[in-house]
Image: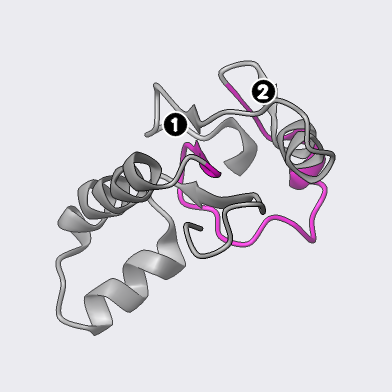
Amino acid sequence: ANYYPDDRWSQYNTAHDQIQTLFYRAMGGSAADWNDLMLASIQKIQDSASNFHSYTAPGAIHCITGDDIFYTREVEGVKLHDWVEAMVNDEAWDDVMCTDCETDPEAQ
């Protein structure tokens, strides 16, 4: 993000992403450690790049942009599609982080 300071950068994750956790385990990591390490990595990027923001949703669902959940996903009152739209349209946007990261209402 710092290499392209005039551009906006973002990352979407679920707190317990099943696919990212699977790959982390395949590389020898512990599934129990993945969430804390992901959050630390996101924080490190946020601390060093003001043009980067993240959206962290509860649960373990991976790759939602091709599904209806992209339009219904809401965390802390912010819908994901509105957050992405604000980023793309150069509007105000900020980091979004789930407070109850264990329970995913979209996984029902």
Q: What stretch is highlighted in magenta?
A: 51-75
Left/right placement of residue 107 relative to residue 70 reads: left
Left/right placement of residue 8 relative to residue 38 reads: right
Question: Please, which residue is most extreme toward the top here?
Answer: 77
Question: Please, which residue is most extreme toward the bottom here?
Answer: 27
Quadrant assignment, res 99 = top left
Measured from the top left, where is residue 87 in percent x and y?
73, 40
**For residue 78, which numbered disc appears in the image?**
2
Q: Residue at x 70, y 36 (%)?
A: 80
Which quadrant would the C terminus be assigned to in this image?
top right
Measured from the top left, where is residue 92 in percent x and y?
70, 25
Q: Residue at x 65, y 29 (%)?
A: 93
Q: Residue at x 44, y 31 (%)?
A: 103
Residue nearest the observer in this picture, 16 or 47:
47
Q: Which of the two labelled residues, at mark 1 and mark 2, occupies the earlier sequence position? A: 2
Judge the density around disc 1: few (<14), some (14-19), many (≥20) Cα neighbours within 10 Å. Answer: some
70 inside magenta stretch: yes
72 inside magenta stretch: yes
Residue nearest the observer in this picture, 8 or 75:
8
Quadrant assignment, res 90 = top right
Check disc 1 and give the amino acid type: Thr
**For residue 103, which numbered disc appears in the image?**
1
Check disc 2 and give the amino acid type: Val
SS for tag 2? Answer: strand
